Image: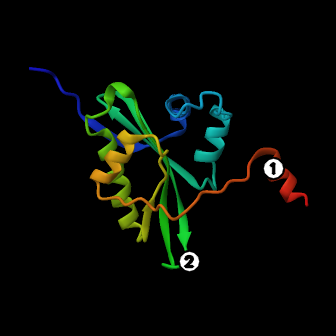
Amino acid sequence: MTDQKTITLRDAQPSDAATILHFITELAIYEKEPDAVKTDEQAILKTLFSEGATAHSLICFEGDTPIGFAVYFYNYSTWLGKNGLYLEDLYVSPDSRGNGAGKLIMQHLARQAIAKDCGRFEWVVLDWNQPAIDFYNSMGAEPQNEWIIYRLTGQALINFAEK
């Protein structure tokens, strides 16, 4: 008989900054963008834990071991006249996938969205990430294929802002 450890969640704390950075780095590697991570522990402390921070994080544990995280924030739907909960990142370490951690995180955030009277719970997924797509479909989530994401970043953002 195997000793199965309990999967738990808690709100991230400032002392989790290094763990969050570790998971962000693992996620970037998984998403085939290992050099894309430009943040550090100080930026995580500032953006997730300082007064006025608008993003929030959860840490998922198997026993006492951190195995995943989520970062989310609230947005607004003008059509609904309600806030929405936007999941920026969800990551579970490869060795812990399939144990219910991702589902626990998503259900926790869904309950939080309901408790905060959000009209939506949204996120994006890379089109090649079939395991994630299958997982989201199994929850009853529906892809929004008619929308195209646009982004200004780096020098393009600076150039446009200065015009």
Label 2, on which residue?
78
User: The N terminus appears in which quarter of the rendering?
Assistant: top left
Q: Secondary structure at mark 1?
A: helix
- Please tell me which residue is depicted at 52% across the width and 34% down the height of the picture: 31
Residue depth check, mark 1 versus mark 2: number of the one nearer the observer: 1
| Image-based side of 58 in relation to 4, left or right | right
Task: Find residue 131 and name its label.
Answer: none
Q: Are circles 1 and 2 on residues that touch, CB within 8 Å?
A: no
- Please tell me which residue is depicted at 26% across the width and 39% down the height of the picture: 100
Label 1, on which residue?
156
Where does the image place residue 97, in percent across and percent down from the top left? 32, 32
Where does the image place residue 70, in percent across and percent down from the top left? 45, 44
Outermost residue toward the right in this view: 163
Amino acid of disc 2: Thr
In-front residue for pair 162/58 = 162
- Please tell me which residue is depicted at 32% across the width and 46% down the height of the picture: 135
- Are there few (<14), some (14-19), or many (20+) residues within 10 Å of tag 2? few
- Are there few (<14), some (14-19), or many (20+) residues within 10 Å of tag 1? few
Amino acid of disc 1: Ala
Where does the image place residue 72, in percent across and percent down from the top left? 50, 52
